[in-house]
């Protein structure tokens, strides 16, 4: 795995967090990993995703997918893709209304900047309680940075022949 670290970004709100990294791979290759819900567990830096439970092999706008999760206790969560711009941006949300986004910006020479963000600015009261109880807002920046390093390692690896 790469020794490179992702950069944790300053945000304008305590309800948002973000991190970014440069990956030596085309945006299309990275986006294919992000759009495959069964791959999410492989680059999850939080250790909370246990497995993909349901959903399409490749996400699309409006697609729903469910994950088996564990933060202190096991649970399942169903997400809906709310933004889908091929090779540029993918965002999903669930009933607690926070959003996970990945934005890809292809730079020169096959390098892509990937920014992961978490936005809980429009969530209802019960969701704020959950974020506080789990400590997610404190841990998210580090978990996102770890996820991006894992994503980088996956996407820069040579394909197995």
Image (cartoon, rainbow, N blue to C red):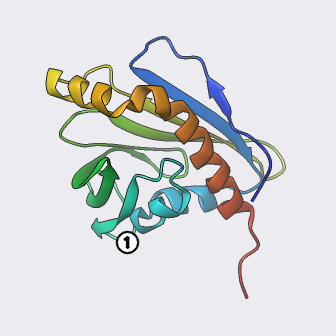
Position above or below: 111 against 120: below
Query: Horizontal and vertical percent for residue 28?
Result: 60, 58
Residue drawn at x 38%, y 62% as measured from the top left? 50
Is 3 in front, or is 88? 3
Judging by the rendered image, the residue that carries numbered circle 1 is 57
Farthest residue to the front: give it.
Answer: 72
Is 127 in front, or is 111? 127
Position above or below: 133 against 32: above
User: In this image, 148 relative to 122: left or right?
Assistant: right
Query: Horizontal and vertical percent for residue 109?
Result: 84, 50
Farthest residue to the right: give it.
Answer: 109
Counting every numbered tag in the picture gives 1
User: In this image, 46 relative to 84: left or right?
Assistant: right
Q: Which of the 4 image quarters holds residue 68?
A: bottom left
Residue drawn at x 17%, y 23% as measured from the top left? 124
Q: 10 Å neighbourhood of mark 1: few (<14), some, or many (≥20)?
A: few
Is 138 in front, or is 52? 138
- Quarter of the image with the N terminus in it: bottom right
Q: Which of the 4 image quarters holds residue 103?
A: top right
Per the image, label 1 sits on a secondary structure element best described as loop
Residue drawn at x 53%, y 16% as measured from the top left? 11
Residue drawn at x 62%, y 62% as measured from the top left? 29
Position above or below: 153 against 160: above
- Quarter of the image with the C terminus in it: bottom right
Farthest residue to the top: give it.
Answer: 12
Query: Horizontal and vertical percent for residue 20?
Result: 64, 35
User: In this image, 107 relative to 27: left or right?
Assistant: right
């Amino acid at each position: 795995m790469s020794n490179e670290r992702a950069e944790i970004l300053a945000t304008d709100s305590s309800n948002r967090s973000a991190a970014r990294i440069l990956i030596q791979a085309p945006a299309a290759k990275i986006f294919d990993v992000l759009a495959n819900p069964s791959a999410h567990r492989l680059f999850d830096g939080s250790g909370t995703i246990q497995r993909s439970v349901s959903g399409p092999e490749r996400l699309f706008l409006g697609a729903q997918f469910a994950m088996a999760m564990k933060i202190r206790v096991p649970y399942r969560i169903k997400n809906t893709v709310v933004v889908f711009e091929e090779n540029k941006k993918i965002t999903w949300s669930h009933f607690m209304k926070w959003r996970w986004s990945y934005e890809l910006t292809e730079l020169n020479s096959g390098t892509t900047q990937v920014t992961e963000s978490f936005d809980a600015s429009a969530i209802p009261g019960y969701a704020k309680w959950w974020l506080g109880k789990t400590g997610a807002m404190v841990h998210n920046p580090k978990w996102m940075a770890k996820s991006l390093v894992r994503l980088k390692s996956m996407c820069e690896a040579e394909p197995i022949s």
